[in-house]
């Protein structure tokens, strides 16, 4: 049997040299690789933070696209109204309450008689 009982200050302890040796190696391996584990943890945190940052930027871009579409619709509506109101018939209707009327005769050209041609 590989297990031997050793008496240590009145306490019996099971001693298995192979198991204790493996525990020591695993412990040393863990201690030796702590910087690597910390590096991996840091990379994991950065990876998660980058994902959150990307989601936040996508939400901002989508909000901006939505706002841009709303502004485009508003621009088209205002442009249509301006085009409609700038028609000659609509202008005549708009200025009629002010007492202005359309000319029926062409405008007369006024020339200065003191200047020579």
Image (cartoon, rainbow, N blue to C red):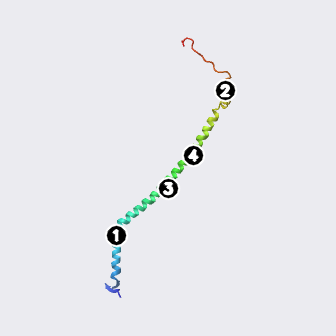
Q: CA distance from mark 4 to mark 2?
A: 39 Å
Q: CA distance from mark 3 to mark 2?
A: 58 Å
Q: Identify residue for label 4.
A: 69
Q: Identify residue for label 1.
A: 31
Among the two numbered marks 1 and 4 on one chain, the one whose residue lies closer to the N terminus: 1
Determine the residue positioned at 45% across, 58% down: 49
Determine the residue positioned at 58% across, 45% down: 70
Among the two numbered marks 3 and 2 on one chain, the one whose residue lies closer to the N terminus: 3
Among the two numbered marks 1 and 3 on one chain, the one whose residue lies closer to the N terminus: 1
Q: Identify residue for label 3.
A: 55
Task: Choose top left, top right, bottom left or bottom right for residue 75.
Answer: top right
Q: Is residue 49 left or right of residue 75?
A: left
Q: Residue furthest front?
A: 117
Look at the numbered discs 1 and 4 and tell me whether their residues touch, using CB distance below 8 Å: no
Q: Residue 101: x, y in percent?
A: 68, 25
Picture disc at residue 98: 2
Among the two numbered marks 3 and 4 on one chain, the one whose residue lies closer to the N terminus: 3
Q: Residues within 10 Å of mark 4 (few under 14, many from 20)?
A: few
Q: CA distance from mark 1 to mark 3?
A: 37 Å
């Amino acid at each position: 049997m590989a297990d031997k009982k050793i008496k240590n200050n009145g306490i019996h302890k099971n001693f298995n040299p192979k198991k204790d040796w493996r525990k020591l190696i695993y412990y040393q391996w863990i201690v030796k690789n702590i910087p690597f584990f910390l590096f991996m943890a840091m990379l994991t945190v950065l990876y998660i933070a980058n994902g959150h940052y990307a989601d936040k930027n996508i939400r901002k871009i989508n909000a901006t696209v939505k706002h841009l579409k709303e502004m485009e619709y508003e621009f088209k509506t205002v442009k249509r109204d301006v085009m409609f109101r700038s028609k000659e018939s609509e202008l005549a209707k708009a200025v009629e309450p002010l007492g202005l009327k359309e000319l029926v005769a062409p405008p007369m050209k006024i020339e200065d008689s003191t200047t020579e041609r």
